[in-house]
Image (cartoon, coloured by chain):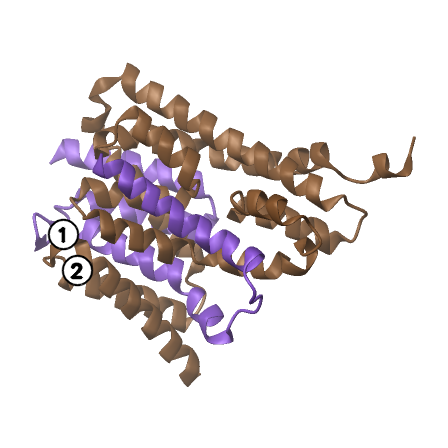
Amino acid sequence: MPKHELLAGFGAGARDTIPMLVGAAPFGLIFGTLAGPAGLSPWETLAMSLFVYGGASQFIAITLLAAGSGAWVIVATTFIVNLRHALYSATLWRHVTGWPRAYRAFCAFFLTDETFAIVYHKLNEGTPVKLPRYYLGSALAMYGNWITWTLAGVLLGHAIPGMADWGLEFAMVATFVGIVVPLLKGRSQLGAALAAGTVAVAADGLPYKLGLMLAALSGIAAGLTLERRR
Amino acid sequence: MSTYWMIAGMFLVTYGVRAGLWLGDSHRFPDSIRRALDYVPIAVLSAIVAPAVLLQHGALVTSWNNPQLAGALVTGVIVWRWHRLLLGIGAGLAVFVVWRWLL
């Protein structure tokens, strides 16, 4: 067997991503199911998964949409929520700098939390890897999985039309609670959450859900202030 | 149509964030922004959760008469205590549905 065949490539990238596929599946399903009642058509729902491809921002978008938020607030919130991906691209930069520019442009689209975690872990492991292929294996497995489960959710929501009345909209709130709680590791994190929550409740009456942006910025400011004081 | 424009906007900002450093000239990330980003998920999600759980038709409801609050507390405690995300979401959802039905 030629030596390069021994390097971890496309298949290994896809295989290593399997646990992430299982973890993301229910969220794709919930997103696809709830997007309809939130006001997206089936095609719009699929388009969001196909083109935006960012789970957290998609969940937040349909939550805001259902609450009657303006499109600009949703786009701005998407930007803030997905800013963390810039950190990932900065972290991986020196590993991808040798790739052809067009291939880099293509691969960047798939830089999610999950693919970053898998690729970063592989790089830290120090075992030989054909990174461009390994990355793409993980990326396309994750992407295909997300589209498939979104579609399954859309079909499920269509097959059971009354689902909007089941209180599933609360599933989103519960998901967000479940994501936030483990992040509250210290005083500054707790302060950020409290400040954001308080401002959001107080500013709920502002038009276009602008209170959300105000609250998010307050939370970030509170967290940074508490961190500096320590 | 406006929904497709919104999705196009979401695509542009998301792809821009992912691809910007890989295609641009600057590959360093200012430390202050790096630290601020740590708080983004907490701040944004808390800002969404708090009104959804505490407000009913614009009024603050913190009594037992609030199924959202009951469900969120159950999810929060399960995830905090036992680190089981999906179990927490499922149990919180169940409590919310039953609570609302009982009221």
Q: Which residue is mark 2?
A: A201
Residue lying at 60% horizontally and 45% vertically, measured from the top left: A102
| Amino acid, disc 2 | Val
Q: Which chain is brown?
A: A
Closest to the observer, B14 or A23: B14
* B18 left or right of A47 in image: right
Which numbered tag is attached to residue A105? none
Given the current orientation, which residue lies at the most extreme right position? A1
Could you tell me if residue A27 is visible in this image?
no
Q: Find numbered disc 2 in the image and state the secondary structure of the residue it sits on.
A: helix
Please tell me the colour of chain B.
purple
Which numbered tag is attached to residue B55? 1
Q: Write down the quadrant of residue A129 in the picture.
A: top right
Q: Residues within 10 Å of mark 2 (few under 14, many from 20)?
A: many
Q: CA distance from mark 1 to mark 2?
A: 7 Å
B36 lies above or below A154: below
B59 lies above or below A225: above
Rendering coords of residue A184 (x, y %) = 41, 62
